[in-house]
Image: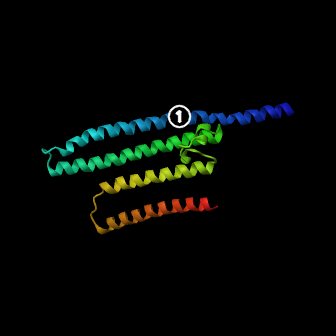
């Protein structure tokens, strides 16, 4: 009976290794999203050379500017999403497989990439996801056409809520450090 229990516990313990495909997939997806965002930056910069053209009229320049700002926001969003996937891959690995010794002993290593518990991983992912949502809000707000005062009031309310979310995320961080 003891050997059956030992065999079962070994199987149960090693079942944590099913996380490895998720770690690899998250890492590969992160690299892919970094690549996509970088290619977008390359084409964005290429299009911006036309911005200084003396042949471009004010309307066309304004449209190019608005389109470029939207693309910049999309690039930031892409890099943030890639960062979420990278943090998720590292966090899953550290929580289920093994500590990443290189990250633990590195002076250059950001403490963002060192995960000690599921709460750590959730907090780090939550902050990056909050930033993605803020960037998306900015993207939508920058392209909106306001027709009446109520729409401006909704925008102001959205900005207040973004500020409140940032305040609460930082307040929670400071409270955790005090404990």
In this view, the residue farthest toward the front is 107
Residue 133 place in picture, x, y as percent = 44, 53
Residue at left offset 58%, top offset 43%: 91
Q: How many marks?
A: 1
Taking depth in this image into account, of 82 and 114 the one nearest to the observer is: 114
Taking depth in this image into account, of 55 and 153 the one nearest to the observer is: 55
Seen in the picture, residue 153 relative to 12 is either above or below; the reply is below
In this view, the residue farthest toward the right is 1
Seen in the picture, residue 70 relative to 175 is either above or below; the reply is above
Judging from the image, the colouring scheme is rainbow
Q: Is residue 24 left or right of residue 132?
A: right
The quarter of the image holding the C terminus is bottom right
- Quarter location, residue 55: top left
Taking depth in this image into account, of 177 and 118 the one nearest to the observer is: 177
Residue at left offset 30%, top offset 54%: 143
Q: Which residue is mark 1?
A: 25
- Quarter location, residue 171: bottom right
The quarter of the image holding the N terminus is top right
Residue 108 place in picture, x, y as percent = 53, 43
- Quarter location, residue 144: bottom left
Q: What element does badge 1 sit on?
A: helix
Residue 118 place in picture, x, y as percent = 62, 48
Categorize mark 1 by other alpha carbons within 10 Å: few (<14), some (14-19), many (20+). some
Residue 52 place in picture, x, y as percent = 19, 45
């Amino acid at each position: 009976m003891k050997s059956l229990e030992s065999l079962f516990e070994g199987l149960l313990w090693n079942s944590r290794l099913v996380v490895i495909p998720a770690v690899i997939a998250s890492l590969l997806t992160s690299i892919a999203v970094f690549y996509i965002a970088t290619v977008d930056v390359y084409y964005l910069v290429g299009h911006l050379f036309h911005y200084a053209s003396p042949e471009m009229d004010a309307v066309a320049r304004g449209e190019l500017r608005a389109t470029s700002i939207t693309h910049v926001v999309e690039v930031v969003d892409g890099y943030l999403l890639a960062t979420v996937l990278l943090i998720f891959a590292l966090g899953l690995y550290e929580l289920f497989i093994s500590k990443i010794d290189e990250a633990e002993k590195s002076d250059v290593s950001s403490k963002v990439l060192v995960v000690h518990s599921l709460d750590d991983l959730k907090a780090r992912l939550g902050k990056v996801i909050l930033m993605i949502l803020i960037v998306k809000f900015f993207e939508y707000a920058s392209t909106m056409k306001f027709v009446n005062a109520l729409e401006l009031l909704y925008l102001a309310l959205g900005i207040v809520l973004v500020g409140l979310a940032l305040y609460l995320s930082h307040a929670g961080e400071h409270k955790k450090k005090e404990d």
